Amino acid sequence: MISKTAVRERQKHVLLVDDNEDILEALGTGLGHRGYKVSMYSDPSEALKAFTATHFDVAVLDVRMQPMDGLELCSKLKEIDPQLPICFLTAYADTVTQWPDHALLVQKPITLDGLTMALQDIESRNK
Protein backbone atom coordinates (compact mmCIF):
# COMPACT_ATOMS: atom_id res chain seq x y z
CA MET A 1 0.00 0.00 0.00
CA ILE A 2 1.29 3.49 -0.90
CA SER A 3 1.24 6.04 1.89
CA LYS A 4 -0.28 9.50 1.45
CA THR A 5 3.16 11.00 1.98
CA ALA A 6 4.60 8.96 -0.88
CA VAL A 7 1.78 10.09 -3.19
CA ARG A 8 2.29 13.77 -2.25
CA GLU A 9 6.02 13.50 -2.86
CA ARG A 10 5.75 11.79 -6.22
CA GLN A 11 7.19 13.61 -9.16
CA LYS A 12 4.67 15.84 -10.94
CA HIS A 13 4.34 14.94 -14.63
CA VAL A 14 4.20 18.00 -16.90
CA LEU A 15 3.00 17.96 -20.50
CA LEU A 16 4.99 20.80 -22.12
CA VAL A 17 3.96 21.82 -25.64
CA ASP A 18 5.64 24.64 -27.57
CA ASP A 19 6.52 24.77 -31.25
CA ASN A 20 9.66 26.80 -30.50
CA GLU A 21 12.29 24.08 -30.01
CA ASP A 22 14.67 26.37 -28.08
CA ILE A 23 12.02 27.38 -25.54
CA LEU A 24 10.79 23.80 -25.28
CA GLU A 25 14.26 22.43 -24.58
CA ALA A 26 15.23 25.18 -22.13
CA LEU A 27 12.05 25.00 -20.07
CA GLY A 28 11.78 21.22 -20.22
CA THR A 29 15.36 20.64 -19.16
CA GLY A 30 15.12 23.26 -16.43
CA LEU A 31 11.92 21.81 -15.00
CA GLY A 32 13.52 18.37 -15.07
CA HIS A 33 16.41 19.70 -12.97
CA ARG A 34 13.86 21.11 -10.53
CA GLY A 35 12.28 17.73 -9.90
CA TYR A 36 9.48 17.58 -12.45
CA LYS A 37 8.99 14.75 -14.90
CA VAL A 38 8.55 16.50 -18.25
CA SER A 39 7.28 15.19 -21.55
CA MET A 40 8.07 17.72 -24.30
CA TYR A 41 6.32 18.07 -27.65
CA SER A 42 6.75 20.61 -30.42
CA ASP A 43 3.76 19.20 -32.31
CA PRO A 44 0.40 19.60 -30.54
CA SER A 45 -1.06 16.59 -32.38
CA GLU A 46 1.72 14.37 -31.01
CA ALA A 47 1.15 15.79 -27.54
CA LEU A 48 -2.54 14.88 -27.78
CA LYS A 49 -1.66 11.31 -28.77
CA ALA A 50 0.70 11.03 -25.81
CA PHE A 51 -1.93 12.45 -23.47
CA THR A 52 -4.37 9.69 -24.32
CA ALA A 53 -1.82 7.07 -23.26
CA THR A 54 -0.17 8.70 -20.22
CA HIS A 55 -1.23 10.45 -17.01
CA PHE A 56 -0.15 14.08 -16.65
CA ASP A 57 -0.60 16.31 -13.60
CA VAL A 58 -0.53 19.60 -15.53
CA ALA A 59 -0.25 20.86 -19.10
CA VAL A 60 1.84 23.87 -20.13
CA LEU A 61 0.77 24.97 -23.60
CA ASP A 62 1.99 27.64 -25.98
CA VAL A 63 -0.96 29.52 -27.48
CA ARG A 64 0.19 30.05 -31.07
CA MET A 65 1.11 26.72 -32.64
CA GLN A 66 0.33 24.75 -35.77
CA PRO A 67 -1.46 22.61 -36.87
CA MET A 68 -3.50 23.14 -33.70
CA ASP A 69 -3.27 26.17 -31.41
CA GLY A 70 -3.01 25.90 -27.65
CA LEU A 71 -6.65 26.80 -27.04
CA GLU A 72 -7.84 24.01 -29.31
CA LEU A 73 -5.40 21.56 -27.72
CA CYS A 74 -6.64 22.62 -24.28
CA SER A 75 -10.20 21.90 -25.32
CA LYS A 76 -9.28 18.41 -26.52
CA LEU A 77 -7.26 17.67 -23.36
CA LYS A 78 -10.17 18.79 -21.18
CA GLU A 79 -12.51 16.43 -23.04
CA ILE A 80 -10.27 13.59 -21.87
CA ASP A 81 -9.50 14.94 -18.38
CA PRO A 82 -11.79 17.77 -17.26
CA GLN A 83 -9.77 18.25 -14.06
CA LEU A 84 -6.41 18.80 -15.81
CA PRO A 85 -4.78 22.06 -14.70
CA ILE A 86 -3.65 24.18 -17.68
CA CYS A 87 -1.01 26.88 -17.92
CA PHE A 88 -0.82 28.88 -21.15
CA LEU A 89 2.37 30.55 -22.34
CA THR A 90 2.00 33.41 -24.78
CA ALA A 91 3.66 36.54 -26.04
CA TYR A 92 0.30 37.63 -27.45
CA ALA A 93 -1.98 37.82 -24.40
CA ASP A 94 -3.52 41.06 -25.61
CA THR A 95 -4.72 39.46 -28.86
CA VAL A 96 -6.71 36.60 -27.35
CA THR A 97 -10.15 37.67 -26.22
CA GLN A 98 -11.38 34.51 -24.49
CA TRP A 99 -9.34 32.45 -22.05
CA PRO A 100 -10.70 29.36 -20.35
CA ASP A 101 -11.69 30.33 -16.79
CA HIS A 102 -9.76 27.44 -15.32
CA ALA A 103 -6.43 28.26 -17.00
CA LEU A 104 -3.45 30.23 -15.78
CA LEU A 105 -1.90 32.63 -18.29
CA VAL A 106 1.84 33.35 -18.25
CA GLN A 107 3.31 36.05 -20.46
CA LYS A 108 6.40 35.28 -22.58
CA PRO A 109 9.25 35.76 -22.35
CA ILE A 110 9.19 33.50 -19.32
CA THR A 111 12.02 32.54 -17.03
CA LEU A 112 12.41 29.13 -15.48
CA ASP A 113 11.74 30.71 -12.08
CA GLY A 114 8.54 32.26 -13.43
CA LEU A 115 7.30 28.97 -14.83
CA THR A 116 8.19 27.13 -11.63
CA MET A 117 6.21 29.67 -9.59
CA ALA A 118 3.26 29.27 -11.99
CA LEU A 119 3.34 25.48 -11.56
CA GLN A 120 3.50 25.86 -7.77
CA ASP A 121 0.52 28.23 -7.95
CA ILE A 122 -1.43 25.70 -10.01
CA GLU A 123 -0.56 22.94 -7.57
CA SER A 124 -1.71 24.98 -4.57
CA ARG A 125 -5.02 25.82 -6.33
CA ASN A 126 -5.68 22.14 -7.00
CA LYS A 127 -5.06 20.68 -3.56
Image (cartoon, rainbow, N blue to C red):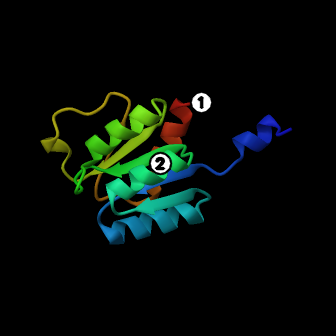
Question: Horizontal placement of 12 versus 10: left or right?
Answer: left
Q: Secondary structure at mark 1?
A: loop
The location of residue 9, given as percent across then percent down, is: 72, 46
Is 1 above or below relative to 68? above
Q: CA distance from mark 1 to mark 2?
A: 22 Å
Q: Amino acid at mark 1?
A: Lys
Mark 1 packing: few (<14 Cα in 10 Å), some, or many (20+)? Answer: few
Instruction: Residue under label 1, please give it.
Output: 127
SS class, disc 2: helix
Q: Percent from the top left, x then y, of residue 6? A: 78, 43
User: Does the CB distance between marks 1 and 2 fall below 8 Å?
Assistant: no
- Using residue 55 as the reference point, say whether residue 43 is left or right of it: left
Residue 40 falls in image quadrant: bottom left
- Give, as a three-letter code, the residue at label 2: Phe
Residue beneath disc 2: 51
Earlier-in-chain disc, 1 versus 2: 2
